[in-house]
Amino acid sequence: MKIDRLIGILSVLLQQERTTAPELAEKFEVSRRTINRDIEDLCMAGIPIQTAQGVGGGISIMEGYSMDRTLLTSKDMKMIMAGLRSLDSVSGSHYYGQLMEKIKPGSSELISGSDSILIDLSSWNKDIVASRIALIQDAIEERRILLFDYYAPSGDTQREIEPYYLVFKWSSWYVYGFCRTRQDFRMFKLNRMGRLRDTEQTFQMREAPAPDLTGSRIFPRNITVKAILDPTAKWRLIEEYGPDCFEQRPDGKLYFEGFYTNMEGLLVWVLTFGDKIEILEPVELREKLLEMVTKIQNVYGENQNG
């Protein structure tokens, strides 16, 4: 990602007297145009970088300038390394491992006993997600349009988007961008994509609002749920809703009140508890459960009779 590359470029400039845009482009596997934008960003951040044309020219930090490396304490470095390792866990390339080597030799493979935070952002289908993340990163950097099939509860669609952000939230990866199909900004879950490809068509940047990642925005509280659960379900309620979402009754059972976004998802959630839950509200859900139980009995009854 961009901030990691900026740190890497700064590290290179601090360690060697002079380098060139082509060398940096090759090292970080991006275009010269991207490197030029990165150098401009570093200058805007207050790093006095100078460039010189011709033989013996290149990119360097202004003579006499030095960065106090003590600004990064041992704890700071551990936090940086934890962040880079977490990104390396979903990387489809060796970029983050190489970046860790530049910052702290040997760190890409070695986890010392003093490390206190280990983060793995990968999912069960790590290889698929990693390749999608790499493709989307490149498209964001080069401002290229993406095309993919998208599978959602509302149905299957083909989407064409201008990507702006990669987002890790709610234990999943998403891409946020302008959807040309819907003519609005949307967020798409990487695990729901099919046939993701780079069209190699470029786009002009828009005034892109930052994605609203609040839970109430993505998962609105549309349905109030009231239920009685068996005590063996306590860990589930605490994990998903927190320790204050239920009251323990004198008989040991748990009275739960919470919210859910849609009836279909709520129905699936309730079924995962099996016979350990009794729904009080909404009444509509009780009726759906009775209807489903009747259909299940018919299915298994027919199979048994057959």
Image: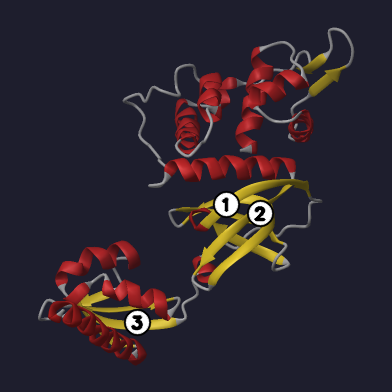
Q: Which mark is residue 159?
A: none
Q: Which residue is mark 3?
A: 225
Residue 145: give x, y in percent of width and height: 72, 50
Mark 2 belongs to which amino acid?
Leu
Q: 281 or 158: nearer the eye?
A: 158
Give the labeled residue for mark 1: 195
The answer to whether one can see residue 276 in this image is no
Q: Which mark is residue 147?
A: 2
Q: Which image quarter: residue 242?
A: bottom left
Q: Please state if 286 lies on the left or on the right of 204 as rendered.
A: left
Looking at numbered disc 3 in the image, what kind of residue is underneath it? Answer: Val
**Is the Cβ of the residue at disc 3 closer than 8 Å to that at disc 2?**
no
Residue 120 horizontal/vertical position (percent)? 40, 41
Q: In the rendered view, would you say 223 is above or below 25?
A: below
* Left or right relative to 149: residue 261: left
Mark before the other along the chain sequence, 1 or 2: 2
The count of marks equals 3
Residue 208 relative to residue 258: left or right: right
Mark 3, mark 2: which one is toward the viewer?
Answer: 2
Dots 1 and 2: beta carbons under 8 Å? yes
Please tell me whether mark 1 sits on a helix, a strand or a loop.
Answer: strand
In the rendering, at what x and y percent does residue 51 appear? Answer: 84, 20
State whether residue 250 appears in this view: yes
